[in-house]
Image (cartoon, helix red, strand yellow):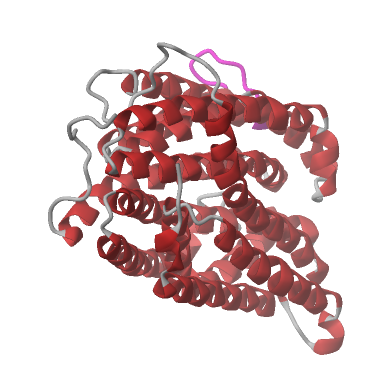
Amino acid sequence: MSEAPTAGDLNHGPLFVRLVRFCIPLVLGMFFHGLFNLADLVIVGKLGDWALAAVNTAGILAMVPMVMATGVNNASIAVISRNFGMRNYRRANANTLQSFLLLGLFAVVLGTPMFIWARELNELIGATGKQLVPATEYLQISAAGLVTMFWLIQVTAVLRAGGDAFWPMVLMIGANVLNVVLSWAMVHGTWGLPAMGVPGAAWGTVISRAVFMVFGLYLITRPTSPVKLVLRGFRLRPRMLWNRTRIGVPSSMQFVVRVFAYMAILRLATLYGQPVAVQAALAVGFRLDLLATFTATGWGGGAAAMVGQALGAGLHKRAEHAGWLAAGLNAAMMWGIGLVFYLYTDWFVAAFGKDPAVDPQFATMHGIAVEYLRIAVFAYGFAGIGITLAQALNGAGSTKLPLFLDFTCFMIIQVPLAYYMGVNHEELGYDRTDLWWLLNGVIALTAFLYAFVWWRGAWKEKEVQ
């Protein structure tokens, strides 16, 4: 049975004003969420390039379950926001509980093998020598704490689906600030804590997420929360769990495709020589990319919630315009970030290690990272468009098409071309800069395809429950 309207209804007021007011806190929150990974690299970078490489390889592997859980988050936003737009708050609340149960199961199923085979997984993507042991320990700690990451992100997804952008921002900023403090203390041994090195960064992240996960759970159990986690009458609802899985798995696989493409590029870039320096450089370059793209998901997440609520209320034109507007604003923001990165590339890269003039071991890594970043930023605006419209499609419940587009662009086009260029680079005269431009071209192609799909509008007829 439907209830009276509550706070968080995104279907009232001028679209531009409502979108900007809703998305800006989400952008800020996701920016600080992106700082999670950056903070770890900056902190451990003082230990040496091997520490940068260790956190990067382990971090990539830890990202696989995270992006799989993101599919459940996207499914939750699609279903909860649609029911919220229909003012069926009871069903929205019921779906909230089932989503947390599903993610708890995911944490066990995905975390257990990652913990057991942490060393073998790190070796698989190129961890060797001095970086292997700390990378293994970092991954095991991350695997043991998966539920803190899953449930913290799910809390923010539930709040966004209910039209609340303020508390997701607070949760992400607070967790990141605590992460920086704890990671520094545990890596370098301050305030009476032992110096744990690279594993200390993983402990800092897990603990900080756990603290704010608990706070977030409190927020969505309050009577004033637009969407609530209601434990009264708790029971498993197989149909709801299946619905979350059916919608969420394609979205999860979409992100997994991107991570595997990233892992492939990490290996293929070493074909041009200097493998340790390349991995350390890409640890820096890709993490700066990740900071920008996490920030971009603030606009995408806002668009997903607004599209879901608008479709639930039958406002198809408002849903369509929300996607276009968010994509345009995101592209402008992303190219602005790219300009800052381009102008101050040396400063950003130097923050992850020591001054190459003082410690020559960082000189090669520094040069490759600068080279990569000054090319990558040209595609940032296209990345913003693709991210926004992909999330808007997910918010509409259309998750299979984004998976198809990403698989085609990144696995069918990008990876084979990168492999061909790397294996034949001496004969064909290619160098690493040609690889970076290839990545840019694929990102631009992806953005144009998403724009075409959004323009066609078949997603408006997608049914979710």
Which image quarter holds the N terminus?
A: top left
Q: Image check: 425 left or right of 84?
A: right
Highlighted range, magenta: 187-199
Residue 142: x %, y % from top left:
64, 30
Q: Quadrant of residue 279?
A: bottom right
Task: Please check the rendered image and state whether residue 379 is part of the magenta-colored stretch, yes or no.
Answer: no
Q: Quadrant of residue 385?
A: bottom left
Of all residues, the one furthest to the front in this rendering is: 1
Which image quarter holds the C terminus?
A: top left
Of all residues, the one furthest to the left in this rendering is: 13
Residue 350: x %, y % from top left:
53, 55
Relative to the observer, which residue lies in front, 379 or 94? 94
Relative to the observer, which residue lies in front, 322 or 173? 322
Compared to 464, does 113 lie above or below? above
Instruction: State the residue at coordinates (52%, 20%).
Output: 190
Instruction: State the residue at coordinates (42%, 14%).
Output: 231
